[in-house]
Image (tube, rainbow, N blue to C red):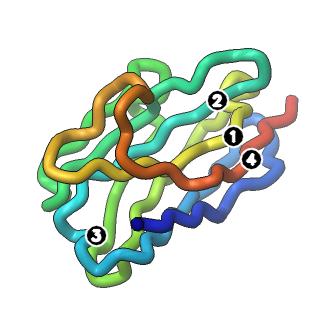
Amino acid sequence: QVQLVESGGGLVQVGGSLRLSCAASERAFSSYYMGWFRQAPGKEREFVARISWDAISTYYADSVKGRFTISRDNAKNTVYLQMNSLKPEDTAVYYCAAQVGIIIPTRPNGINYWGKGTLVTVSS
C-alpha cells in the first residue's frame, strides 16, 4: 500500500507562489506515474498536472499551463508542484495521485493511490 503525504499548502496573496510536495512511502516510486488534482469547495475534483515515471513527459490542464510546473525527484520519492502567479480560482485542496504502470488519467476515476490533500488558499 503506497502512502502519499502532501505538504506545502497555505495562504498566499494573488500573484504569489507556493511549492507543494508529495512524499511517497514506496521504494517503487520511481516506476509510478504521478500527478496532481485539486478540488474547490462545491466542485468536482479536477486534473492539474501529471508527470511520467522518468520525468520526460509532463502534461497540464489549460487553466494552469504556463504558471504551474510539475517535477519529481526519484531519489527522494517526492513529486513537486511549483505554482506561480496564483489566482483566487486556484484556491482548492490539492491532492497527489499515483498510478502504477500507466499514465495518470485526466479524470479522477480509477486512480490507484491518493494523498489526503493540502489546502491552498489564494486571497485577493
x and y, in percent, of residue 69 in the image: 40, 47
x and y, in percent, of residue 94 in the image: 61, 43
Label 2 neighbour load within 10 Å: few <14, some 14-19, many 20+ = some
Q: Determine the CA span between mark 3 and mark 4.
A: 24 Å
Left or right: 5, with 102 as reference point: right
SS assignment at label 4? strand
Report which residue position mark 2 lands on: 39
Report which residue position mark 4 lands on: 119
Report which residue position mark 3 lands on: 29
Amino acid on which disc 2 is placed: Gln
Q: Nearer the viewer, mark 3 or mark 1?
A: 3
Q: Determine the CA span between mark 2 and mark 1.
A: 5 Å
Pointers 1 and 4 in contact (C-beta within 8 Å): yes
Q: Earlier in the sequence, mark 1 or mark 4?
A: 1
SS assignment at label 2? strand
Pointers 2 and 3 in contact (C-beta within 8 Å): no
Q: Residue at x 34, y 58 (%)?
A: 71
Pointers 2 and 1 in contact (C-beta within 8 Å): yes
Q: Residue at x 69, y 45 (%)?
A: 16
